[in-house]
Image (cartoon, rainbow, N blue to C red):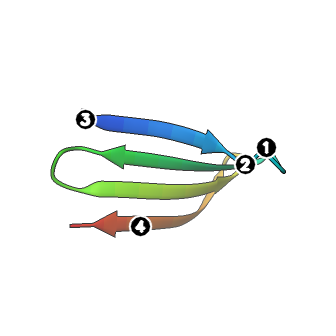
Amino acid sequence: MSEFFTQLFCDLNKSYSLIIEDDGRVAYAYLYKEEDMFGSTINR
């Protein structure tokens, strides 16, 4: 279960979005183009 979750869309091109999620131990960021994830970051 996430303690924090948000999805942000690019103002110039709505097919791009960024999802940020924090479960209290690890933070994740996912970069999407339409339905395909093409980047991610994990911070410990």
**Screen quadrant of the C terminus:** bottom left
Q: Residue furthest right?
A: 12
Q: Is residue 36 placed above or below 40 in the rendered structure? A: above
How packed mark 2 is, by other alpha carbons closer than 10 Å (few <14, some 14-19, many 20 or more), is few
Amino acid at circle 4: Thr
For image coordinates 25% across by 35% down, the residue present is 3
Report how far apart the C-alphas of labels 2 and 3 lie in the structure: 24 Å
The CA distance from mark 1 to mark 2 is 5 Å
Of the residues under marks 1 and 4, which one precedes in the sequence?
A: 1
- Determine contact: label 1, label 2, CB under 8 Å: yes
Of labels 4 and 3, earlier in sequence is 3
Gap between marks 4 and 3 measured at Cα: 17 Å
In the picture of the structure, the residue carrying the numbered disc 3 is 3
- Labels 2 and 3: the sequence-earlier one: 3
Label 1 sits on residue: 14
Amino acid found under the numbered disc labelled 1? Lys
Judge depth for marks 4 and 2 and give the one in front.
2
Quickly name the residue at label 4: 41
Q: CA distance from mark 1 to mark 3?
A: 26 Å
Return the x and y of residue 13 as percentages of the image width and height.
83, 49
